[in-house]
Amino acid sequence: MKEILELLEADARLTPGQIAAILGKKEEDVAEIVKDLERKKIISGYFTLINWDKLGAEKVSALIEVKISPQRDVGFDAVAERIYRFPEVRSVKLVSGACDLVVMVEGRTMKEVAHFVSFKLASMEYVLSTATHFVLKTYKHHGTIVDDGEDDRRQVIVP
Amino acid sequence: MTFKTNWAEMVNPAVRDIPPSGIRRFFDLVTEVKDIISLGVGEPDFVTPWHIREACVYSLEKGYTMYTSNHGLLELREEISQDLSQTYQVSYDPRGEILITVGVSEGLDLAMRVLLCPGDEVLVPEPSYVSYAPLTVLAGGKPVYLKTSAENGFQLTADMVEKALTPRTKVILLGYPNNPTGATIDRKHLLNIAELATAHNLIVISDEIYDKLTYVGEHTCVSSLPGMRERTILLNGFSKSYAMTGWRVGYAAGNSDFIAAMTKIHQYSMLCAPITAQVAALEALRHGQSEMRKMIAQYGRRRRLVVDTIREIGLPCFEPRGAFYAFPDIRCTGLTSDEFALELLKEEKVLVVPGNAFGEQGEGFVRCAYAASVRDLMEAFKRIGNFVRRRTGRGKVLTFSFGKKEHKDDVIRKTV
């Protein structure tokens, strides 16, 4: 099962048949396991990694450090939930250190993101402060180097 | 009138008479064809792990650009000694029993030159790596081939060795896991061969460059067998396991008198292996285990995919247990190895290496390296499937789906 997940994590487009061949299992079994993993939300989705910069698409993202005061019984979770429900929020993580939450926000323009931070996020109850870092360039995400120049440079035939 | 030197005449007949490598002519062909998928590459498709490259860059920044001892960096020899004792429980003194060479190729050349007197015979399994026979000949020896075949899983047995023995037999050259077949050698066969070697006072040169790339069973290091440490020259390196082919660094381990003799040639012809490569190898041994295991897991997965696919195409294929090659039998197409490789390249733009490049016993086979991405492998075998279907003239269209588990044994019997 772990091997199936590792394979899918590296390439979501592998079919159950291909995975079966790679792992020496039966296609039906693999399909069943994958279905089960999807049901249990262990596989929570299949996405495509797109380099929007290359397309020249207008897109702005920001990493926001958020300090909040935890609430009785639910700790940080209730505030985190209020934040992650916004569609412009791409990811929310509770971290140790100087801030509590690290929130990744995406918008079409800088203004849009700034608007979201000041009107929605910073003004939210229990949010003590925010620090916004606009992303200037992405070098690596999801374990993948964005602009990897390490093409296959081997000679085509080697004994 | 100017006097022109006839250089062809100047060439030492021993060199002149060595046939050129069987794969050379493919270089010219491939430059003319675009969009080739190559399964002809006998090296990892991974780039050397970053931490190794980074360690090398750091060493350059720090000014490590000088010669090392002829034997190689002591730290590296110590690390190799430790690695061998941990992995195979065989101990070598880093101060006198290990020599850092410029790849296994240099190690093999040195060992042959030190061992062989004119006419000495070297038992060379076939098919095997392209350099074994030529290096034997250049050192004045005579290769005697031990013909292994697909029918017995390219297994080398003591029986075959015994039949080939003559009073001039001096060396058995083993290279397992094997390039091009992917065969490994069973411990029990090795034990029997070891017994023969002892009885007939033979030296074993063991090229174990693919040792870490063993997927079925465990690799047996020849010198770890009872009594074999004293009559084995162990050759290994970093090229395949750590994806470090271009660094050219390997080592020889063996008896101190013999290593001293190898060092004599090495100090005059090579001086030492490049220090940058040695520093990188040191980093590989110290911190490279987890990256190495990841790469090997990848080869293991592709191995299954490739063997299944080849058999589904209808080509019998012995199950490779090590290295990263599959060696399918293509005789059912009615083509020779050369024809198969050439026509496949022209018609389907897939490059494989004809089996006869690895000795006569390889005729009727081609070597497919699976050191390539799964995507490329899938596309390549789809094309090979088309090609084989056309050549075998079977009306039946093979449905091409990976991982279909029909029974392979039948397929093999039918087509052999």
Image (cartoon, rainbow, N blue to C red):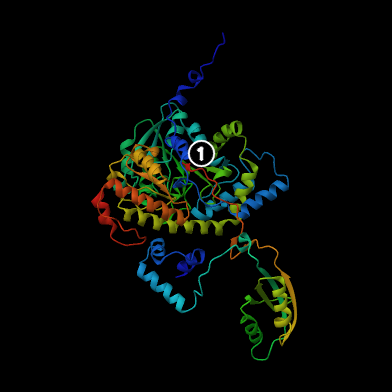
User: In the image, is residue A125 above or below residue B265?
Assistant: below
What residue appears at the point 49 percent right and 74 percent down from the top-left corner?
A: A43
**Considering depth in this image, is A129 or B68 the residue closer to the camera?**
A129
Q: Is residue B266 visible?
A: yes
Residue A6 lies, in percent from the top left, at: 49, 66
Identify the image quadrant of residue A90: bottom right
User: In the image, is residue B400 above or below residue B137?
Assistant: below
Q: Residues within 10 Å of mark 1 (few under 14, many from 20)?
A: many
What residue appears at the point 35 percent right and 46 percent down from the top-left corner?
A: B192
Q: Quadrant of the N terminus of chain A?
A: bottom left
Residue B364 lies, in percent from the top left, at: 32, 42
Q: How many marks?
A: 1
Residue B50 lies, in percent from the top left, at: 61, 54
**Considering depth in this image, is B268 or B74 the residue closer to the camera?**
B268
Label 1, on which residue?
Answer: B105
Q: Is residue B216 visible?
A: no
Asked whether, in this view, residue A137 is left or right of residue B261, the answer is right
Furthest residue in direction bottom, as rendered: A72
Residue B138 lies, in percent from the top left, at: 47, 29
Asked whether, in this view, residue B256 is left or right of residue A122, the answer is left
Mark 1: which amino acid?
A: Ser
Furthest residue in direction top, as rendered: B1
What SS does tag 1 mark?
helix
Callout 1: residue from which chain? B
